Image (spheres, coloured by chain):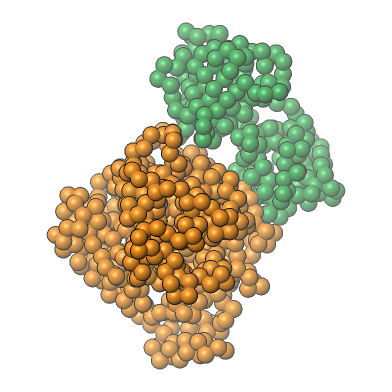
């Protein structure tokens, strides 16, 4: 099914990321209807750097472009660095009171359905495993309860360990594997070659490429 | 030991050389290497010495490329080899008992690495030789020099600096050069001592801007000379307490280019020579290839986010894939009427480009033209600047669209070699990602602080 979410020509990363987030709603019929019936213009701005995009809901099409539209109905300012945390700080929103319907719709659409970490890991593996350079097998261990999911050839060439929340975040495209490893939010057992290739997959997964 | 190795050994002994600085160039054009004791250096010949491959695995901000791996890399971190080209051995005039030598980046087995731009250019030169063609090339190096010390320039964020000239942007003004003599005299003294042949120099258009013109040379040597000029100009600036930049667009007004001229001869005859201006078949196919692959080659000519800020109409940088006879508004300028000086000038590259890759892109384009019998379009016939957005073959305007153009051009990819192109495109997309996700402003219409911090003193 063709997506109704479009991006500008030569898009910047945040445009791709936001479009990818919005497209995830299209797998759920109720949310897909909400996406298609919403109208309004929303600016989504990073609180910590110059990244900013405008999402234009046009009843049936959604367009994501770089920059802030001067006539936006609503502006959301969020800390991109902490958005994947378990309890992220609430974004600052302006214009919601005068555009209640739009605000309710956007709050849902920017928080699309995400499965549990095993479901998301399975989806990520289906995406990543055909790519050249990826490990032949992946073992994922949840540090909360010791549960394990294995994909591909066993014994797995590469292992990722983390809490259920962190695993869910990285496999759903909410964060990037390499960044989470560098920050000590996830752990890995394997070769640097596979860390790099899987991080590349993780970035592309986040941006819907 | 070869006679050249013996000769270097004797020279090291005779000149009392205690240290040898080995220089290799990264894809981004940075010069990296080690200082080896003379004993260690001589003992490493002819193979060369090891260096951690991570030296080639980081971007211009020092962040490791952690989004892909390359087949030549060991599974974990390992070493590669810097193999000296002893023909480039030279004693440094400004360092006591120290010599320098340019190196190729090779695998432990001795095979050239896909990331070695110098080896890539040499391969293309060898390919030309195999077809009975000999290329010569010469670059025009542009740089801007400012009076502030490096620390003062950093405190100012590299903005509002004092040009080493009158504040007026005039060009060719000897009055400006007068302000630069102290700096230039030392640059020229050092370049002469290490064998870099300067044909001439002059004040360029921007305040504080200098252009150095090189004598024609073998293509690899021509690019070597650019590497050494940039390094020497940086060294002298550091020694004299001023700053120099080769950034493509360090300010909103002015840019630095890296124009490159090349000639071809077959059996001693100039391929581009045409008394009446009508080029022969081989020249037409070669030039057709250079022009047709120019959109793809733009990725190599304009490697950074900042490179594309120079590519605007009426700023003396080309914006369309055009050619013309002695037409400086065109991307490719053909000078064909003199047998001795018949040549092609490509005017796309910014001062921030890797010179080996600039020349490799031009030669690969020409080779693609020969191999694919690419037709030469008519000369542009109008000024190449300020042309409407449609109906003209505009060059890519962003780092990502240039990478896409390279990815889409099978002819240039084949001529440059797939492993190199694949690696290059990944590094350009990484640079795009870094700009947008580490503080660069996507809506900025002029050079940003992010660009000045990342490029001003480095590229």
* Vertical comparison of B95 with A121: above or below: below
Residue in the image at 48% along x and 83% along y: B38
Residue furthest out toward the right: A154
Q: Which chain is green?
A: A
Q: Residue at x 44, y 35 (%)?
A: B391
User: x and y percent of residue B408 in the render?
Assistant: 58, 45
Expressed as whole percent of the image width and height from the top left, the position of residue A177 reads: 65, 42
| Quadrant in the picture for the C terminus of chain B | bottom left
Figure quadrant of residue B444? top left
Q: Name the one closer to the observer, B52 or B273.
A: B273
Q: Is residue B459 visible?
A: no
Image coordinates for residue B155, horizontal then vertical, percent: 30, 49
Task: Examine the rendered structure and indicate whether residue B196 appears above or below residue A75.
Answer: below
Quadrant of residue A125 in the image?
Answer: top right
Residue drawn 50% across the image and 57% down it: B285
- Outermost residue, front side: B276
Q: Is residue A208 left or right of residue B237?
A: right
Judge whether residue A118 can be spotted in this image: yes
Which quadrant of the figure contains the N terminus of chain B?
Answer: bottom right
* Residue at image point 43% right, 56% down: B353
Task: Using the image, determine if residue B261 lies above or below residue A5.
Answer: below
Chain that is orange in the image: B
């Amino acid at each position: 099914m063709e997506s109704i979410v479009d991006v500008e020509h030569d898009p910047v990363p945040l445009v791709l990321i936001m479009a990818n987030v919005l497209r995830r709603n299209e797998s759920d019929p109720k949310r897909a209807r909400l996406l298609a019936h919403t109208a309004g213009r929303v600016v989504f701005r990073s609180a910590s750097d110059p990244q900013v995009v405008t999402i234009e809901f046009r009843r049936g099409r959604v367009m994501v472009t770089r920059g802030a539209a001067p006539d936006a109905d609503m502006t959301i300012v969020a800390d991109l660095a902490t958005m994947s945390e378990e309890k992220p700080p609430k974004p600052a929103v302006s214009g919601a009171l005068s555009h209640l319907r739009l605000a309710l719709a956007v709050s849902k659409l920017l928080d699309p359905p995400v499965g549990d970490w095993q479901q998301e890991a399975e989806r990520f593996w289906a995406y990543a495993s055909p790519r050249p350079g990826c490990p032949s097998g992946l073992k994922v261990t949840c540090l909360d309860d010791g549960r394990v999911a294995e994909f591909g050839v066993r014994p797995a060439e590469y292992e990722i360990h983390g809490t259920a929340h962190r695993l869910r975040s990285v496999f759903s495209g909410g964060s990037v594997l390499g960044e989470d490893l560098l920050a000590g939010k996830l752990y890995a057992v394997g070769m640097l070659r596979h860390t790099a290739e899987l991080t590349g997959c993780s970035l592309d997964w986040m941006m819907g490429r | 030991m070869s006679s050249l190795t013996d000769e270097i050994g004797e020279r090291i002994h005779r000149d009392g050389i205690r240290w040898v600085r080995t220089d290799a160039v990264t894809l981004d054009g940075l010069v990296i290497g080690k200082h080896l004791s003379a004993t260690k250096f001589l003992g490493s010949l002819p193979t060369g010495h090891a260096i951690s491959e991570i030296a080639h695995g980081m971007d211009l901000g020092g962040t490791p490329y952690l989004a892909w791996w390359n087949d030549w890399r060991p599974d974990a971190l390992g070493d590669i080899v810097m193999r000296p080209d002893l023909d480039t051995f030279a004693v440094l005039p400004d360092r006591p008992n120290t010599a320098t030598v340019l190196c190729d980046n090779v695998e432990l087995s001795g095979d050239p690495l896909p990331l070695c731009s110098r080896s890539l250019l040499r391969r293309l030169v060898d390919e030309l030789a195999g077809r009975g063609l000999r290329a010569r090339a010469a670059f025009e190096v542009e740089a801007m020099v400012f009076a502030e010390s490096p620390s003062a320039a950093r405190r100012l964020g590299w903005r509002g600096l004092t040009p080493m000239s009158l504040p007026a942007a005039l060009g060719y003004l000897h009055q400006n050069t007068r302000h630069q003599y102290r700096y230039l005299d030392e640059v020229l003294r050092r370049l002469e001592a290490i064998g870099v042949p300067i044909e001439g120099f002059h004040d360029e258009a921007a305040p504080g801007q200098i252009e150095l013109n090189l004598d024609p040379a073998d293509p690899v040597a021509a690019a070597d000379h650019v590497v050494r000029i940039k390094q020497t100009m940086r060294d002298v600036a550091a020694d004299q307490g001023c700053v120099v930049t080769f950034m493509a667009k360090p300010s909103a007004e002015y840019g630095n280019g890296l124009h490159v001229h090349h000639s071809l001869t077959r059996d001693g005859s100039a391929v581009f020579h045409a008394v009446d201006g009508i080029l022969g078949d081989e020249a037409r196919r070669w030039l057709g290839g250079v022009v047709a692959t120019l959109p793809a080659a733009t990725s190599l000519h304009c490697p950074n986010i900042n490179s594309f800020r120079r590519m605007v109409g009426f700023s003396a940088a080309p914006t369309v894939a055009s050619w013309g006879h002695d037409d400086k508004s065109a991307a490719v300028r053909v000078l064909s009427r003199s047998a001795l000086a018949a040549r092609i000038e490509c005017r796309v590259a910014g001062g921030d480009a890797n010179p080996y890759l600039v020349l490799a892109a031009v030669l690969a384009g020409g080779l693609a033209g020969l191999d694919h019998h690419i037709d030469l379009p008519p000369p542009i016939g109008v000024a190449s600047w300020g042309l409407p957005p449609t109906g003209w073959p505009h060059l890519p305007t962003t780092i990502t669209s240039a990478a896409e153009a390279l990815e889409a051009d099978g002819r240039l990819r084949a001529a440059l070699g797939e492993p190199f192109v694949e690696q290059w495109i990944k590094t350009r997309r990484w640079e795009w990602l870094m700009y947008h996700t580490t503080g660069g402003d996507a809506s900025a219409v002029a050079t940003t602080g992010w660009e000045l911090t990342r490029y001003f003193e480095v590229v």
